[in-house]
Image: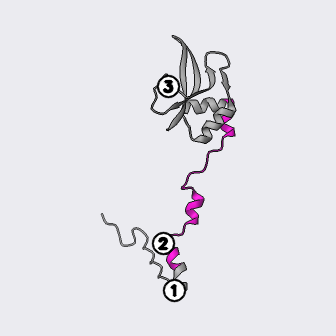
Amino acid sequence: MATRIRLRRTGKKKQPHYRLVVAPAAAPRDGRFIEILGHYNPRSDPPEVRVNSERALLWLRRGAQPTDTARAVLARSGVWSLFRPQPAASSAAEEAAVPTAREAAAAAAPALGEEAPPEPEALPPEGAYGSAG
């Protein structure tokens, strides 16, 4: 089940208060939720933010995706800086470690007793043959 960390509106008309909740991604804004992680009151000066950091980190590590506003609330409370997202599967380091087809063929050629494939010739600079206009 895909889960989201989002704000759930409470309070009276024109006096909003919000709860930071973990909810199924398909649930409506003020609908079903799994757990309350904290509270956010934007009307106080300064805005009041209370978050259970242990539970929030647990849900983030489980893969719950915060909305943009929920991420801002987590950052304000200091929880977002404690969370280190797992690197994506296609990181730059992984891509650098995977050899290209040409590198793989060149590495395999000496083992097979063959010559390495020739390098392609460089293309002439653009406009070397005059303008095409």
Q: Which residue is identified by label 3? A: 32
Tell me the mark number nearer the camera, choosing from 3 and 1: 3
Give the numbered dot on residue 101.
2
What kind of residue is marked 3?
A: Arg
Q: Secondary structure at mark 1?
A: helix
Q: Which residues are magenta?
A: 77-106
Front-most of 21 and 104?
Answer: 21
- The mark lying in front, picked from 2 and 1, is 1
Q: Quadrant of the C terminus?
A: bottom left
- The tag earlier along the polypeptide, 3 or 1, is 3
Q: Residue at x 62, y 45 (%)?
A: 85
- Which amino acid type is shown beneath numbered disc 1? Leu
Q: Which of labels 2 and 3 is toward the front?
A: 3
Residue 113 x/y as whole percent: 52, 89
Mark pair 3, 1: CA separation: 63 Å
Q: Position of residue 86 (x, y in %)?
A: 61, 48
**What distance separates the C-alpha of mark 2 from that of mark 1?**
16 Å
Q: Which residue is mark 1?
A: 112
The structure residue drawn at horizontal position 54% and vertical position 69%, both measured from the top left corner, is: 99
Identify the secondary structure beneath mark 2: helix
Q: Position of residue 88 (x, y in %)?
A: 56, 51
Which amino acid type corresponds to the residue marked 2 in the rendered image?
Answer: Ala
